[in-house]
Image (cartoon, grey):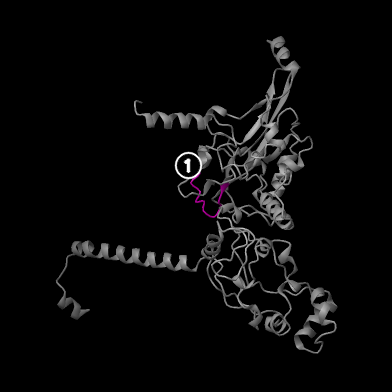
Amino acid sequence: MGVLRGLLPRLTRRQMALIGIPLTLGGLATAGAVAVLIFLGASGGTIRPAPVQPIAYDHAVHAGDNAIPCEFCHRGVSTGAVATIPSVEQCMYCHAVVGQDLPGVLRLAAKWEAQEPIEWTRVHRLPDHVRFVHVTHIDANIPCETCHGDVETFAVMKQVNALNMGECMGCHRDTTNQPASSASPSGNAVLKSSASLDCAVCHR
Amino acid sequence: MSNPHETAALAATLEGNGALIGEDEGGSDGHRWGMVVDADLCTGCQACVVSCYAENNIAISEEDRITGGRAKTWIRIERYWEGEFPHAKARFVPVLCQHCDNAGCETVCPVWATYHNDEGLNVQVYNRCVGTRFCANGCVYSARYFNFWDAEWPTPLDYQLNPDVTVRTKGIIEKCTFCVQRIQRAKTEANRDNRELADGDVQPACVQSCPTSALVFGDLHDAESQVAQAVHSERGFRLLENSGFEPAVTYLAKIDPHAKEATTAHE
């Protein structure tokens, strides 16, 4: 400080204020702008780390090695808004006779014996003001991978896409005004109908 | 007014204003949702109000909020007394968002949180709303409600929340949506069955629960629909028509042959 005082011109209190206040305000404004940008970048678009589940369920074994279709367990996906997590009973359809010695299946069987549900931790969550409906997208032949990634390779279920409004709009814009049954620009979906861009379709 | 272009434009504007509802919005192939309220059939039973609360996750208003004028009722029954005792008669007018074609609420929103969609719905986008309340002031029907408080849903009341409808937070405006979630659901179901929406596929909660069928909802673009037929009734009028808001809800006047003589006899 002593060195600085020697180098800098001596300033009166008034001069200090004249220089200092704009500098401080400018600094605060910059910090605020950065904070807003970080918030905008993060809000609604965070890919959260994969949660630890009560049972180490392995999608790679079920959907990958054994090639069980997604819909076999997530039965609500083709009838309603929510894809649904299978009940313990549904797991036991197979596990009453398959892999009874595996540690995960033992824990499952214990839950079944006790007639208790498994408290899975949710992986994909949309904000409360969005009403996503699975069945509409299944009807439009959108493959599950479009949003959920290559689940058949995931040993631990994780979120791969931000699932923010930009991602929704990207697809909805691509598929709006497309003639029915044409391939989407991504090339992997054959569409039955075009997507709507009306706010009320999701926000209601 | 010597410019022929201006004259033509003015003529077109006047013609547009004179057009019947449903004929100027969204093209001819889209839907145009509308409602007819038959005041002659309404008994003021409030079933529509109750079902609307249940369907749309509307916060229950306690007495102090009602007396303070801050209650939320997307549809409400306005009661008027006509005449003096013993000739007094109760008149009921269910009032909901009129989904005006020329709405006063839409133009004043600074953040485009309320807009008119292709199907004639006046849509409120909750996550865009910043709570200026300009729209509520612009609405002559007082059909828009501000959330002064966060709604409380003590368990087990939260179990009955409708998962298809957003639970609104403090600081935003909400209002009747013509049960847009039911419209979406009906469309999804029709799409699954590879058919067009039929008349009666979409029923808002209020219409479904009305015991006297005083409320009729449907597509005004479908000439065969019940609502499109009822709209042309000679009893038809619209609330505060001179506001120029062009509401999508048509009311049918009360049939009361004794009303006039009772009033005149009293006078």
Magenta region, residue range = B123-134
Q: Quadrant of residue B44?
A: top right
Q: Residue at x 47, y 42 (%)?
A: B108
Q: Quadrant of residue A121?
A: bottom right
Q: Is residue A92 magenta?
A: no
Which residue, given by chain and number where applicable, does mark 1 sit on? B107
Q: Position of residue B11 (x, y in %)?
A: 45, 29
Instruction: State whether the magenta stretch is mostly helix, strand or loop.
Output: loop
Q: Position of residue A188 (x, y in %)?
A: 60, 71
Q: Is residue B130 magenta?
A: yes
- Report the quarter where the N terminus of chain A lies: bottom left
Q: Position of residue B37 (x, y in %)?
A: 69, 33
The answer to whether A14 appears left or right of B248 in the picture is: left
Q: Is residue A46 above or below residue A61?
A: above
Q: Position of residue A189 (x, y in %)?
A: 61, 68
* Host chain of mark 1: B
Q: Is residue B162 above or below residue B81?
A: below
Q: Nearer the viewer, residue A176 or B47?
A: A176
Residue type indicated by callout 1: Thr
The answer to whether A96 appears left or right of A62 in the picture is: right
Secondary structure state at the residue bearing disc 1? helix
Q: Nearer the viewer, residue B253 or A111?
A: B253
The answer to whether B152 appears left or right of A164 in the picture is: right
Q: Nearer the viewer, residue B219 or A156?
A: B219
Q: Is residue A153 above or below residue B218?
A: below
Dot 1 crowding, Cα within 10 Å, few <14, some 14–19, many 20+: some
